[in-house]
């Protein structure tokens, strides 16, 4: 598994390097509120990719935290129901007739 992961990482790095070399020459104007920059296209692509990764990370973390919260609530409910079942199981037959 480690070898497969290493090969996959090397392929991705080779693609990124090839993309960077291919897009190093075209330059674009980037307007940020008051400032204007003339940067290579690859810089814009990398910053856009990074912003997307950060947004995905934040969304993923909120989803995971919600799932963990739901799981804790379900576990508490399960414990409560198990204790209720144990209490009902321990009653005598005479006590059950009163229910």
Image: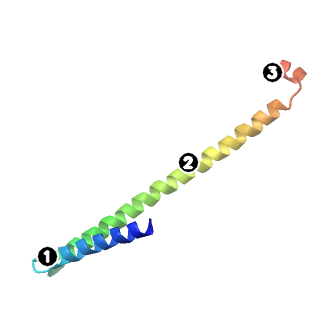
Model colouring: rainbow
Q: Which mark is residue 70?
A: 2
Query: On screen, 75 above or below 93?
Result: below
Q: Nearest the camera: 63 or 99?
A: 63
Q: In the displayed structure, does residue 93 sit left or right of residue 8?
A: right
Q: In the displayed structure, does residue 91 sit left or right of residue 12?
A: right
Query: On the image, numbered disc 1 is attached to which residue?
Result: 22
Report the residue at 85% width, 18% height from top: 97
Give how far across and how far down residue 29 sits, in percent: 12, 76
Image quadrant in which you'd find residue 9 = bottom left
Report the residue at 82% width, 31% height from top: 89
Report the residue at 30% width, 65% height from top: 52
Query: On screen, 37 above or below 96?
Result: below
Q: Nearest the camera: 88 or 5?
A: 5
- For discs 2 and 3, the disc positioned in front in the rendered view: 2
Quarter of the C terminus within the rendering: top right
Q: Disc 2, disc 3: CB below 8 Å?
A: no
Crowding around mark 1 (Cα neighbors within 10 Å: few <14, some 14 to 19, many 20+) is few
Q: Disc 1, disc 3: CB below 8 Å?
A: no
Query: On screen, 88 above or below 38?
Result: above
Crowding around mark 3 (Cα neighbors within 10 Å: few <14, some 14 to 19, many 20+) is few
Between discs 2 and 1, the one toward the N terminus: 1
Q: Secondary structure at mark 2?
A: helix
Give how far across and how far down residue 19 sits, in percent: 19, 73
Between discs 2 and 3, the one toward the N terminus: 2
- For discs 2 and 1, the disc positioned in front in the rendered view: 1
Query: On the image, numbered disc 3 is attached to which residue?
Result: 99
Crowding around mark 2 (Cα neighbors within 10 Å: few <14, some 14 to 19, many 20+) is few
Give how far across and how far down residue 86 sits, in percent: 79, 36
């Amino acid at each position: 598994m480690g070898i497969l992961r290493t090969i996959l990482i090397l392929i991705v790095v080779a693609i990124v390097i090839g993309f960077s070399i291919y897009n190093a020459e075209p330059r674009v104007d980037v307007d940020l509120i008051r400032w204007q920059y003339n940067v290579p296209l690859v810089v814009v692509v990398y910053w856009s990719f990074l912003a997307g990764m950060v947004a995905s990370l934040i969304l993923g973390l909120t989803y995971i935290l919600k799932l963990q919260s739901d799981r804790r609530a379900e576990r508490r409910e399960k414990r409560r129901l198990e204790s209720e079942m144990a209490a009902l199981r321990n009653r005598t037959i005479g006590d059950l007739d009163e229910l």
